[in-house]
Amino acid sequence: MNERNIIARELRKNQTTQETKMWSILRNYQIEGYKFKRQYPIGDYIVDFVCKEIKLVIEIDGGQHNEPQNIEYDETRTKYLNSKGYTVLRFWNNDVDQNLEGVYEKILSTINLIQPSP
């Protein structure tokens, strides 16, 4: 098992409260029948949640993502994921805590943009 897989496993064991809430709506094909994985390695990065079928990444960000070095890191990371064909959605912890329904709706509308209904 490579290092990123070991780190991903540890991250799954130690989810934040917000990641746990998000996982409760993403797991078991609950959103439009799509399978999401959590703490999944893509290249040199580990994303919070991914649906590989439609190449959708969901990130949950805490306040540390407002720090200049983390803003730059996140931008580089997003550019990399976009270059691999992934759409990246980012939500703040506060969004998950205070407006989970709105987060859910944003995920649904993004899925509809990526995979429009026939």
Image (spheres, grey):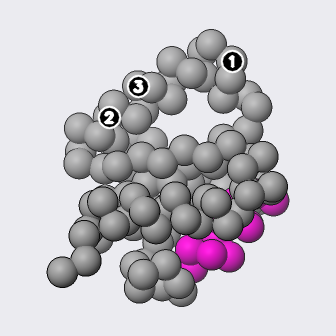
At x 41%, y 25%, the residue is 76
The residue to which callout 2 is attached is 80
Q: Secondary structure at mark 1?
A: loop
| Residue beneath disc 3 | 76
Q: In this picture, is 36 found above or below 113?
A: below
Residues at discs 3 and 1 in contact (Cβ within 8 Å): no
**Which residues make up the magenta segment?**
17-27
Alpha carbon of mark 1 to alpha carbon of mark 2: how far? 20 Å
State the separation of the CA atoms marked 3 and 1.
Answer: 14 Å
Which image quarter holds the C terminus?
A: bottom left
Q: Is residue 108 above or below residue 86?
A: below
Name the residue at the left extreme: 118
SS at circle 2: helix
Residues at badges 2 and 3 in contact (C-beta under 8 Å)? Answer: yes
Residue drawn at x 61%, y 59% as measured from the top left? 103
Amino acid at the residue labelled 1:
Glu
Across and down, in percent, residue 34 comes to 40, 79
Which label number is shown at residue 67?
1
Q: Earlier in the sequence, mark 1 or mark 2?
A: 1
Q: Are marks 1 and 2 in contact (CB under 8 Å)?
A: no
- First in sequence: mark 3 vs mark 1: 1
* x 33%, y 41%: residue: 81
Quadrant in which the N terminus appears: bottom left
Q: Is residue 109 left or right of residue 81?
A: right
The percent position of residue 88, horizontal first and vertical second, equals 42, 46
